[in-house]
Image (cartoon, rainbow, N blue to C red):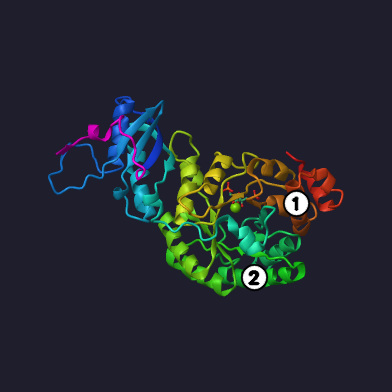
Amino acid sequence: MGLTYEDFLDLSYEPRDSDLVCRFRIDPADDQTMESAASRVASESSNGTWAALDTGEDFTDMGATAFAIDGDEIGVAYPPGLFEPGNMPQILSCIAGNIMGMKAVDTIRLLDCEWPREVVEGFTGPGFGSSVREEIFGVEDRPITATVPKPKVGLSTKRHAEVGYEAWIGGLDLLKDDENLTDQSFNPFADRLAESFDARDRAQEETGEVKSYLINVTADTQTMLERTDMVAEAGGEYVMVDVVTTGWGAVQTVRDRCEELGLAIHAHRAMHAAFDRLPHHGVSMRVLAQISRLVGVDQLHTGTAGLGKLANEDTVGINDWLRSDLYGMRDVLPVASGGLHPGLVPKLLEATGPNICVQAGGGVHGHPEGTEAGARALRAAVEAAVLDEPLEVRAQESPELGAALEKWGTE
Ligand SMILES: O=C(O)[C@@](O)(COP(=O)(O)O)[C@H](O)[C@H](O)COP(=O)(O)O
Ligand SMILES: [Mg+2]
């Protein structure tokens, strides 16, 4: 039985329910047609190669099938047996591996995946998902709020904890480390953990509200496990991981440890744009979000529906997928962050709904009266927005909100 590229194209093939179905946008090279390029995508991402192969008898055919061509998009179906159960790096080495560099296509983008039960069941998924709102904060009717101390790095541990205290006292739920703050000499991880949780405990005492901290444990896998254990010992509820830069295998290992310790995972997506920014190449944020849910993060940055400072891809569509039914797997709480300030909250919630986390760094610490006032303004904006109360009206009883609107407006 020979195996050639042509064996991987069958436009009459109906994907089985158990197939992982991927949709790609491709731009065939000059010497290729959509059909020939599609067959090469299916072949090189499963078990084929450029030369005709004699597979002999002792062979399990786990070849994928390019079964649909629709304009510049193709559909490829993968048998579940091609994949090692629960091994995300292996799956990506198939569907986003060598094909990203094939000469047969000038560009190729993995747009979307339909994940079958057979593949999903290999993954634990999130431990909490959006239930963090109720289970950790006892909040049901509003977004949870977070702030990142700014400047991103460089604050001393003492100042970092003070900023956290001011933000929590001002009404925010979460303090969050920036994606590039880990264990630097000016703000060591262990000291930051201890002093920030001291501040957290005082703020909880004074406000009567539950407060928490998204401390960034990002590092090599062994170090992340050690830091995750330290967070549990300190009475934390969360760890934050830069999931794209650490890698999906490492995230799966941290997820297993968090399962044992009862911790939730906040996923920062720094570097995602290296994969998803160009519309014709790479891996879409939609697929990165799908991967994140499968490997088990509870919160994930998905953008600001175009309102903030960063380029966003389909925030609302991605959020809908993160909440969609996936064979009983828990959902993921979307995090809106990046250039947000109180004036943008109504438009944001109009686009995303209240079941999100709203993060503002500059939009809190840049407030004319400082961090605590910035926090009060954000909390007031969120509470007004869920009630459809105009911010200008709420500003009459919240001078901090008034000052924020005066400084940043509502655009
Ligand atoms: O460093 C920053 O820019 C932020 O801390 C936001 O700060 P500001 O609130 O001060 O803008 C976040 O890392 C980005 O939002 C990440 O992007 P995304 O959420 O799109 O993944
Ligand atoms: Mg940041």
* Residue 330 vs residue 406, the one in the foreground: 330
Mark 2 falls on what kind of element? helix
- Are there few (<14), some (14-19), or many (20+) residues within 10 Å of tag 1? some
Picture residue at 30% right of the left edge, 37% below the top: 65
Mark 1 falls on what kind of element? helix
In the current view of this chain or complex, which residue is farthest to the right? 396
Query: Which span of residues is magenta-colored?
Result: 1-19
In the current view of this chain or complex, which residue is farthest to the bottom? 233
Instruction: Name the image quarter holding residue 27.
Output: top left
Q: Residue 290 vs residue 207: left or right? A: left
- Are there few (<14), some (14-19), or many (20+) residues within 10 Å of tag 2? many
Q: Decide which of tag 2 and tag 1 comes sooner along the chain.
A: 2
Dot 2 amino acid type: Phe
Look at mark 2 in the image and give the residue it sits on: 197
Coordinates of residue 366 in the picture (x, y in percent): 73, 51
Coordinates of residue 382 in the picture (x, y in percent): 73, 50
| Placement of the C terminus among the 4 image quadrants | top right
Instruction: Name the image quarter holding residue 131.
Output: bottom right
Task: Give the CA separation, mark 2 to mark 1.
Answer: 26 Å
Residue 388 counted in the magenta span: no
- Is residue 311 something that shows in the picture? no
Look at mark 1 in the image and give the residue it sits on: 383
* Residue 363 vs residue 263, the one in the foreground: 263
**Quick check: 396 above or below 281?**
below
| Placement of the N terminus among the 4 image quadrants | top left
Instruction: Name the image quarter holding residue 408.
Output: top right
Coordinates of residue 170 in the picture (x, y in percent): 76, 60
The kind of secondary structure the magenta stretch mainly shows is loop
